[in-house]
Image (cartoon, grey):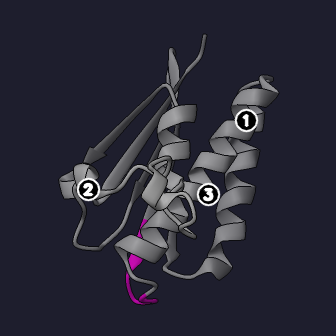
């Protein structure tokens, strides 16, 4: 699915994620995590990657494999270095408004990779 860099399209992503994962597994915990993390990754792509520039697109792919589910989110921004993003649990960051999306994604998924210079996030959930 392709969306504009607008939060108006985020509801469609959530609906599509819920429909996809619910139709491929009866594991309600996995469905909840997948929908939440898809939403977080797309929010990051819109806000930080594409800087909410409507002309820039976000590509989202949901994939079922024999051993896992995959979510891929790619933006058209400049990318980022994961090491440059602060730890939201560090004392200096506790009162910050943002910075928790990557933390949630990395804690709740079974594997996370940042590709194409940080423009693509690949989230994996094992089917165990």
Sequence-wise, the earlier of marks 3 and 2 is: 3
User: Could you tell me residue 85's position as x and y percent?
Assistant: 32, 57
- Left or right placement of residue 109 versus residue 59 in this view: right
Sequence-wise, the earlier of marks 1 and 2 is: 1
81 w.r.t. 123: above or below:
below
- The residue tagged with tag 1: helix, strand or loop? helix
Location of residue 11 (image quadrant): bottom right
Q: CA distance from mark 3 to mark 2?
A: 17 Å
Q: Which mark is residue 39?
A: 3
Q: CA distance from mark 1 to mark 2?
A: 25 Å
Pointer 1: residues within 10 angstroms few (<14), some, or many (20+)? many
The magenta segment is 53-58
39 w.r.t. 121: above or below:
below
Residue 16 is at least partly visible in this image: yes
Predominant SS along the magenta part:
loop
Residue topped by disc 1:
31
Q: Residue at x 68, y 47 (%)?
A: 35
Check the image and name the residue furthest to the front: 91
115 w.r.t. 30: above or below:
below
Quarter of the image where the C terminus is located: top right
Sequence-wise, the earlier of marks 3 and 1 is: 1
Q: Which mark is residue 118?
A: 2
């Amino acid at each position: 699915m392709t969306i504009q860099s607008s939060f108006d399209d985020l509801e469609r992503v959530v609906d599509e994620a819920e429909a996809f994962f619910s139709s491929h597994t009866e594991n309600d915990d996995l469905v909840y995590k997948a929908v939440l993390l898809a939403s977080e990754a797309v929010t990051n792509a819109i806000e930080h990657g594409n800087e909410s520039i409507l002309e820039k697109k976000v590509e989202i792919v949901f994939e079922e494999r024999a051993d896992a589910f995959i979510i891929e989110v790619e933006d058209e921004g400049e990318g980022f270095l994961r090491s440059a993003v602060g730890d939201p649990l560090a004392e200096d960051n506790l009162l910050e408004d943002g910075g928790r999306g990557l933390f949630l994604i990395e804690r709740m998924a079974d594997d996370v990779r940042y590709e194409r210079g940080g423009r693509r996030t690949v989230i994996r959930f094992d089917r165990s």
